[in-house]
Image (cartoon, rainbow, N blue to C red):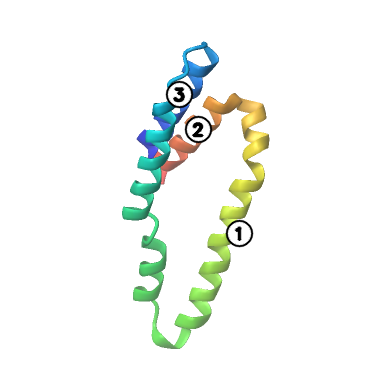
Amino acid sequence: MAVMAGLLAIFFILKSAGNEQNWLALFSLMAYCLSFSLGLGPVSWLLVSEILPDKTRALAVSFCTMLNWTCAFLVTETFLYVEKALKPYGAFILYGAICCVA
């Protein structure tokens, strides 16, 4: 996923230099979605339901779902501010770096 965020950053760098490679943006977004769906995407749903005891599973899964959607909302809500501060390529470099740390 970090590699695809890096490729998307490269696309925006090339775009700012006047050399648009639209296929690069399409490829990186499609590969990002595929790698998320096959990798980190389902992990949080599977892990929480497997490691928790039966007595607390329903409440804990509800809390984890709320936390997951809250974090997704925060990323979506702050993206435009990050993009404005760091330029489009900087935003995707930041997200790729966060993905590497995770």
Q: Which residue is denoted by mark 2 in the rendering? A: 92
Q: Is residue 70 left or right of residue 19?
A: right
- Of marks 3 and 1, the one in the foreground: 3
Query: Callout 3, which amino acid?
Result: Phe
How far, Cα to Cα, is label 3 from label 1? 29 Å
Q: Which residue is denoted by mark 3 in the rendering? A: 11
Query: Callout 1, which amino acid?
Result: Thr
Q: Give above or below for 100 relative to 37.
A: above
Callout 2 touching callout 1 (CB < 8 Å) = no
Q: Quadrant of the N terminus?
A: top left
Across and down, in percent, residue 40 comes to 37, 54
Residue 10 quadrant: top left
Of callouts 2 and 1, the N-terminal one: 1
Residue drawn at x 44%, y 35% is 97
How far, Cα to Cα, is label 2 from label 1? 20 Å
Q: Which residue is denoted by mark 1 in the rendering? A: 70
